Structures are given as structure tokens and as C-alpha cells.
Amino acid sequence: MNKSQPSLSLQPFMRSSLEIKQQFLNFLASKGHRVVPSAPIVVKGDPTLMFTNAGMNQFKDFFLGNAVATEKRVANSQKCLRVSGKHNDLEEVGHDHYHHTMFEMLGNWSFGDYFKTDAIDWAWELLTEVYQLPKDRLYVTVFEGDAGSNIAFDQDAFDTWKQFLPADRIINGNKKDNFWEMGDTGPCGPCSEIHFDMRSDAEREQVSGATLVNTGDPEVIEIWNLVFMEFNRKADGSLEKLPAQHVDTGMGFERLTRVIQGKKSNYDTDIFSFIIDETSAVAGIKYGAAEASDIAFRVIADHIRAVSLCIADGQLPSNTGAGYVVRRILRRAVRYGYSYLNLSEPFLYRLIPSLAAYFSASFPELKAQQDFVSRVIKEEEASFFRTLSTGHCMILTVFRWI
Ligand code: SER
């Protein structure tokens, strides 16, 4: 381990991403949660949403009081896609090392059952006792309050965190960072985020991590968001108190794995490295050889997951709506391969077998439809490569999205 890497010396062994996920689910099960499957990544029947953008989407009606949950505590790993609407990370993908189009969100929920104290206690226990993350690299945020909305500082969250952390590692956050909303309307509430500082000891001595939380520093990153659902944002912008108080937590699985595995990049974890290795073998270019090709490798590794899981959930590429988004993500991956990896014939479809194998325990729908998904992607690629090779690329690249 070199000096610039965090010294996560408490790690007794390198856990695989799948072990990390299983530990999360086992831990929540031990706290009385029912582990449920991910909802489809493509949303049907909710006009406010095209794709699942958070683990709580499938539970929206429980929060709003429109339906009653039979299980009061649930947990899962949810397939999410953030490429449109309120939550859109597309432009960062591949250029940085920790934003994704498709990502897995590890979540636990309370529907009118436990609230802030248990959510915070368990988050701390999982991170520091089960995963054994070093406590002195963890920072948390709490909602500072908002006079305009008549919401007070979140004293309860602060007091609960204070049992575990000194006050200078509990940071006040504003409405932008610490009041989570699903969309323009819908359930929402103050939240408390957990951030991890991955910088070297020398860097940490020079600059306190507290000053870097939520500033875009690529090595001081949010890993978990605990939302305390108490309001419904109505179409006129006003907030209405919900009939009960709920918990909605979401932890970025790819970031968590990076932190536990002590990697500098999400793409260096075992979630992505096999995809990059395979693309590298196809292209005959090494990952790490140049910045432009590295970005292309990361874009492809990210986008192929999004595209294949959407198709496996029944959303084919098309010219309208959700299908158009899938088509644009796929074409973006092809364009990066064409422009920066000198690829001139279909290559994405070749990544599907190993991707399907990786996801076989969590999202078996991909393996079950592996041949179909590969065929759809290959045909899309072939058609787009024809367009690129006939010179339309000059016009098409004017649009960043394609
Ligand atoms: N809904 C919150 C989020 O997406 C926590 O799960 O961050």
C-alpha cells in the first residue's frame, strides 16, 4: 500500500463486493428487516418518474399513507438509474470515479416504525463494527433547518450522532444537501448523510475532512444517506405533514465497496474491473494508458450495466420515452468506444455474459435473458456503427447525449 492510499489497516481481508452486499442484508435482517427484491429499474405506472432513481420509489405509497405496509421494516439492494429529472449524474460519469448512471442502492426502510435513533445507531454499528471502517475517517451531516419552510435544526439527529462522534465531525447542511426529495412532488424530509474521507494521513493532517464534506472533493465522498420522511411536497410547492414518520436510507453500493476495498476509484473494485479488463482485451488498449481512453473505459463499464439491466427489465431501445433514454446511453458508450478506443464494430454485446454472471445472485433476470439482451444490444450497436461510418457522426456529435 503506498503513502497516498488510505491505511484501512483494520481490514482483516479483502471482501468481495458480493460479500459486502450480503453483510448489509444480513445485518438488517438481524435487526428485524425483511429482505425484499429490487423493483424493476424501469418504472411503469408513475407519471412522475421514468426510471427508479432511489430505493424508496417502490414504497412511495407507504410513505404518503395511500397504502399500508404489511412489513414495517424492509431492506434490499435496488437497481437505480439517474439520467434524467431531479437526479441526473450523467455528465460526471466516467470523467470522475464515483458517479454512475446505473448503481445499486443498499437501503433499509421503516414504515411508521423506528425513526432517527435506531436508523443512526444501526448505520454506525454496521459501518464501524461489521465493516470495521475507521471511525476517524467518518463525518456526518445534519439538517440545519430552514426558516422559510418552518423546519427547525435537526437536534434529534445531532444528539444521536453525538454519542458516536465529536461535534466537529457533525456538520450542518442546508436544504440542498440535507433535505431529500424524490422529485418535484412526493415524499421528502430532512436527511443525515455519512461521508468517508479516503485521503492519506498526511493530507488529512494538513486539511480537515470537515472542510471538504459536500464540496465535490473526489476523496471525501458521501456513502450513505439517512432520510427522515415527514413531509409530502405538493404540486403547488407547499409541504404537507405526512400521517406518520418513516425512515428511508440509501447507501451507494459501489462507493461503499470502494471504501471497504481501499480503492481510489469505484472502477477499481471488483464490480467494474472485470468489465474494463474485457473491454481492454477487445480494444487492445490498456486501462491506465491515457486519460481519454481511460474515460472511455469507465463510460463503457458504467453504461453497459445500465443498458443491459433496462433491457432485461423489458425496456427496449426506441425513439421515444424511456426507450429513447436507453438508446442514448447505449449510443454514448458506442461513441466513446469508437472515438477513444478505435472500436469500429459491435463490442458492447460481448460484455453481457460476464455481466450476467456477476449479477446472477442479485438480478437473475439478466442471466435468464442473456441471449436476448446480447442480440438487442448487438443490433443497436451495428445500426449505430453504420451511422457513424457513413459520416453522420459529424452531425450527431453536436448533441452531447448521443
Ligand atoms: N432516498 C434517499 C436517496 O436516494 C435515501 O435512500 O438518497
Image (cartoon, rainbow, N blue to C red):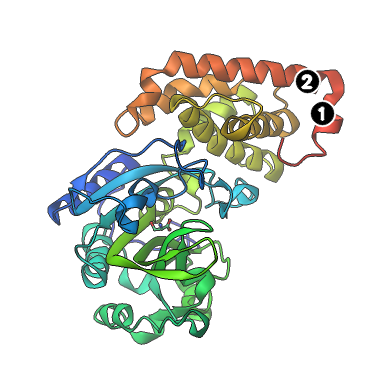
- Residue type at numbered disc 2: Thr
User: In terms of image quarters, where does ligand 1 lie?
Assistant: bottom left
**Tag 2 secondary structure:** helix
- In the picture, the quarter occupied by the C terminus is top right
Residue 164 screen position, x and y as percent: 26, 78
Q: How far apart are marks 1 and 2 (CA)?
A: 7 Å
Q: Which amino acid lies under the numbered mark 1 shown in the image of this protein? A: Cys
Where does the image place residue 175, in percent across and percent down from the top left? 51, 74
Depth check: 153 or 240 in front?
A: 240
Q: Which label belongs to residue 393?
A: 1
Q: Is residue 36 above or below residue 120?
A: above
How far across and down, in percent of the image, does residue 71 sit? 18, 49
Quarter of the image where one finds residue 259: bottom left
Residue found at x 31% / y 77%: 157
Q: How crowded is mark 1: few (under 14 residues within 10 Å), some or many (20 or more)?
A: some
**Of the residues under marks 1 and 2, which one precedes in the sequence?**
2
Task: Say whether residue 109 is left or right of residue 79.
Answer: left
Give the label on residue 387, or none. 2
Residue 277 seen: yes
The N terminus lies in quadrant: bottom left
